[in-house]
Image (spheres, coloured by chain):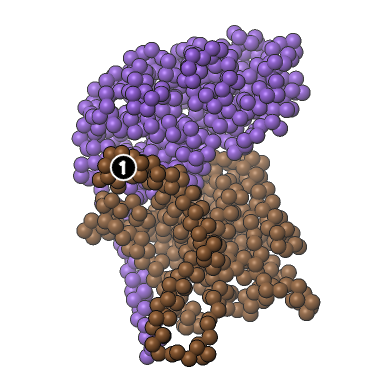
Amino acid sequence: MFNLAKKDRTLLLIVAGMVLLAPFLLQPFAQGSGMAQFNAGYPDLMQRFVIFGILAIGFNILFGLTGYLSFGHAAFLGVGSYSAVWMFKLLSMNVIPAILLAIVVSGLFALLIGYISLRRSGIYFSILTLAFAQMSFNIAYSVLTPLTNGETGLQLALDDVRILDGMNTNGTLPSTNLLPPSLVNGFEMRDTYHLEIGSWLFQFNTGYYLSAIIMLISFYIALRIFRSPFGLMLRAVKTNQTRLNYTGINTRPYTLAAFVISGMYAGLAGGLLASMDPLAGAERMQWTASGEIVLMTILGGAGTLIGPVIGAGFIKYFENIFSKINDTVLHGWFGWLPDGMEDAVVWFVHIFVGKGWHLTLGGLFMLVVIFLPGGLVEGGQRIMNLFKRKKSDGAGTDKQHHPKSTPHVAE
Amino acid sequence: MSIINPTRRGLLKTGAVAGAGMAMPLVFTGSAGAYMNEPSGGSVVLGFNVPQTGPYADEGADELRAYELAVEHLNGGGDGGMMNTFSSDALKGNGILGRKVEFVTGDTQTKSDAARASAKSMIEKDGAVMITGGSSSGVAIAVQGLCQDAGVIFMAGLTHSNDTTGKDKKANGFRHFFNGYMSGAALAPVLEKLYGSDRRAYHLTADYTWGWTQQESIAAATEGKGWETVNNVLTPLATTDFSSYVAPVLNSGADVLVLNHYGGNMVNSLTAAVQFGLRDKQVNGKNFEIVVPLYSRLMARGAGANVKGIFGSTNWHWSLTDEGSKAFVKSFGTKYGFPPSQAAHTVYCQTLLYADACERAGTHNPCGVAEALEGYKFSGLGNGDVEYRAEDHQCFKDVLVVKGKENPTSEFDLLEVVEVTPRSQVEYAVDHPMFAGGALGQCNAG
């Protein structure tokens, strides 16, 4: 099925299952319980998980396969968002044309930047992409303000044209949809079905499922690229580009193709972000945003298929959940301690939550890089191997016929 | 038998679940309540969305203190603060509509994206029925738009851009704070009296909605008094070193520098301007002057001695002696040990006003609350007689013109009130060109 090897098929199905069941999996704690703070199963965060997952998958096609570290990927995300919001303002609130335009525009933009930046490799390539991204950010921030609305961000307005939808007359802003609400109800991105089981509340959001399905398609495409002769060529570029050049192969078309594909993934993510919430701000293109993409990929495991998705989820979880723990919540948790102790513990924990979430994330990132260079995926594999070894210890003792497998990096 | 079977079963399972998952949102849509996040049970959740990091972090921290104080007072704790001096007596100190007030907080990072993500999680995850905060007009406008879409009330905090209640106004959004136009209208006569009517002004402006509209307002108001605007340079919000922006001022022939900056930006740009010796210069035979149209005590503290003798405007100052201000300063001081800033004051008022509107409307329904707030006249909250104008959801009240104190007696006593500009002088028509181009639309209850 899907023209995939058994192992990949299993991986794809596991990912599909987890993504589609996310509203349940991410909502393990009952509403109102002390742990409800850690629930992540609400539409906005779930959408972010899969959308940034797409972004990281795309980034990994470039970085994981060719080893080219782009430090400007946020520019494509931003360009995608702006294109999508303009589509909402001018054409229609339907998300499909917006997402398509986002992919096309960011692809063209990537072609331009890639064509110039890929003349160099290594650190020079990184610096070039960083420079382009900062340039795009500054242009969006203060030069092209009629097109981007500067710092305020591009937003929908009541007097937008929207050729296909017609002028808006009822005084409320329309919302993004997959099928117009005049035809079918329930296809607006913000439509959410609430399912209450006991004191558990599960939210099923149309926007999330659209993003999730697009993410699964993107994942499948990435899987095929990883396994294709093209992917093999990209990996050859990573291993030894000079040798490839000496054998007479021109590597630039390959790296450029990887760069454009990866830019289109970022544009798709940007378009989806704008579809879920029709606003595009310049800060989406800032270098910190580009850095975040690199962090996601390295944290999860560069070069692995599932790693970047895990990394993206990890970072977004910290940003949205840990940053919302405030002193009142902490006092609630540690209320059972004696007074002086309680204050001391709250004071100490306070450093790592709320606005200190960066600190916690930074610490974890260091730990991962030092002890698990292959990212969280390597951690998972080590645990798996631990169990496997225990099982196999009884049966096969012939060490020579069970050579140690190489770490699962680019496989 | 071994490997294929589980996969097939897994496939069937996921297929079935996927089908079910896809089908459900199509069949049932919307939430169960009569309006978005209708409170059930004994508590109601408010969302406090303020910058805890970034250039406006100081203001955000002070806002958060005021929110906590307001919640304490609403729930009947503390000394009641301004609830005792407020002209409405709908608030009883038993929460809102008998429900205990709880709150969640978030970090806007002074970025529209992060602010919207944080507000969304408050609405979707924590069930907040009202969002308030924002220490940047860009953020406030972005979150106001989100609240309009989501169907909850947005009580704007520190946002001074004309656009918040101008071209970006929304039916679900309300602003207590004053705006750029009011600053201009209050400041221009004072500046004319002080510095004369043939001045040449150079503007440094924070490059976003607030900076643009304030610059436009100040330039228009001072040009009305005979001043000339030499140049307007836009500076990115994230700038921390302003020396490259200040240096060209010296050679521009201008004799007044207007800093349309706020928070950390203003502290840095003013410090740079003073370090360049601008205040000791003589240009066109006149003393060089610096004006900071929007002032706050937190900024004055950050800029230290540099603010001495510099004029600006403010929404409120803790040294005011009316009953409301005194009560607020007393309860804030008792709890935190220092006087509140104007940011703290405006968000405290907004929380009380929201609670009061709910009581009077008898519901948390955004449409009912909005109706109760529209055209509402009140007093006793530190600004004299105030009105929430129904047409644009902007509060109209007196504006303070302040000056950096020459001889401060403490680290909090940094500003002195020069003039209380009466409300009539800062009022404008709803269709004033600086505010035109938007529409409230209709209230949205989700």
Whether residue B275 sits left or right of residue A99 in the image: it is right
The image position of residue B137, as x and y in percent, is 50, 34
Q: Would residue A108 be seen by someone viewing this image from the given angle? A: no
Name the one closer to the observer, A211 or A73: A73
In this rendering, position of residue B42 left or right of residue A87: left
Identify the colour of chain B in the image.
purple
Work out which quarter of the rendered image holds the N terminus of chain B and state it: bottom left
SS of the residue under disc 1: helix
Q: Colour of chain A?
A: brown
In depth, the one of A272 and A404 nearer the eye is A404
Which chain does the residue under circle 1 lie in? A
Seen in the picture, residue B24 relative to A138 is either above or below; the reply is: below
Against A32, residue B135 (above or below) is above
Is residue A200 or residue B264 the one in the foreground?
B264
Q: At which x and y percent is residue A168? A: 45, 45
Question: How many dots with numbers?
Answer: 1
In the image, residue A70 lies at what x, y percent?
Answer: 64, 59
Side (left or right) of A361 relative to A143: left
| Horizontal side of residue A378 vs B287, given as left or right | left
Q: Position of residue A319 (x, y in %)?
A: 45, 51
Q: Residue at x 36, y 78 (%)?
A: B10
Label 1 sits on residue: A342
